[in-house]
Amino acid sequence: MKETSLKKQFLYGARAGIPVVLGYIPVGIAYAVMARQAGFSIIETCMMSLLVYAGAAEMMAVGMYAQGASIIAMILTTFILNLRHIIMSTCVFNRMKSTRLGFRLLSAFGVTDEAFAIYTTVPEKQGTPAFFLGLILVTYSSWNIGSLIGALASDFLPPLVTASLGIALYAMFIGLLMPGIRGNIRLGILVIFTAVINTVLSQFIPSSWALIASTLICAAIGVFFVDLKDEEGGNEH
């Protein structure tokens, strides 16, 4: 009976991840095309998705690589970009208190914005480790399938199509920003200010370091400037 219950929970999680597939595969293709244009081989492109599994960070890294950024700059930028995963993983861990540490550490690898949103919004009774395993298996597989398709097809796609896929990076970051900005004017102002600071600094230092500096400076400002209560209040209506 217990095995049947675990199987049902796993399948329930897998079904919950199906809508994410519709977004992951095309964005995974876009990432792979960008990686191939940046000079990555097919194996390197796919291995990055297999081992890193962080869409925005992967696209940021290949974009910086194409611009000639240093390894240190790429590491620091992706680290800052992925700091939110510490909070998300902590929330997931909190729902798996009775689960073995090894499984929880493995689960942290599968935490993405979409998986986190799905897992933390289902009733706690349904949000079991088996559910999360099914969820991340589907989402992780779809991202890597998209990466593989993009890596293989990049040499055959028309130049117009491959060039248009470059906008996927900007679309992904806008998608990450909009939920937080909505209902919080101060956060929106801070985002615009960050862009302005980055543009100004880029005139004096390499763009990769300008991005890191502007992010850190405005994050420090945001601690005092942004009031999360505004966002909470806006979400109540």
Image (tube, rainbow, N blue to C red):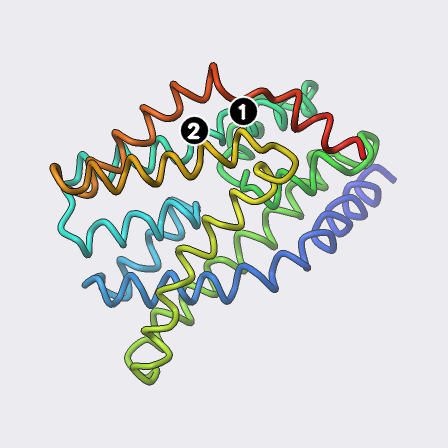
Q: Nearer the viewer, residue 118 or 67?
A: 67
Residue type, mark 2 in image:
Leu
The answer to whether residue 207 is above or below residue 187 is below
Relative horizontal placement of residue 228, taking residue 57 as reference (left or right) = right
Relative horizontal placement of residue 73, taking residue 216 as reference (left or right) = left
What residue is disc 1 on?
87
Query: What residue is shown at x 53% (from left), y 52% (from top)?
Result: 140
Mark 2, Cα crowd under 10 Å, few <14 / some 14-19 / many 20+, is few
SS state under label 2: loop
Labels 2 and 1 touching (C-beta < 8 A): yes
Residue type, mark 1 in image:
Ile
Q: Nearer the viewer, residue 204 or 98?
A: 204
What residue is disc 2 on?
83
**Quarter of the picture holding the N terminus:** top right
Question: Residue 64 location, x and y as percent?
Answer: 23, 49
Relative horizontal placement of residue 21, taking residue 54 as reference (left or right) = right
Question: Residue 127 location, x and y as percent?
Answer: 75, 35
Question: Residue 110 location, x and y as percent?
Answer: 53, 41
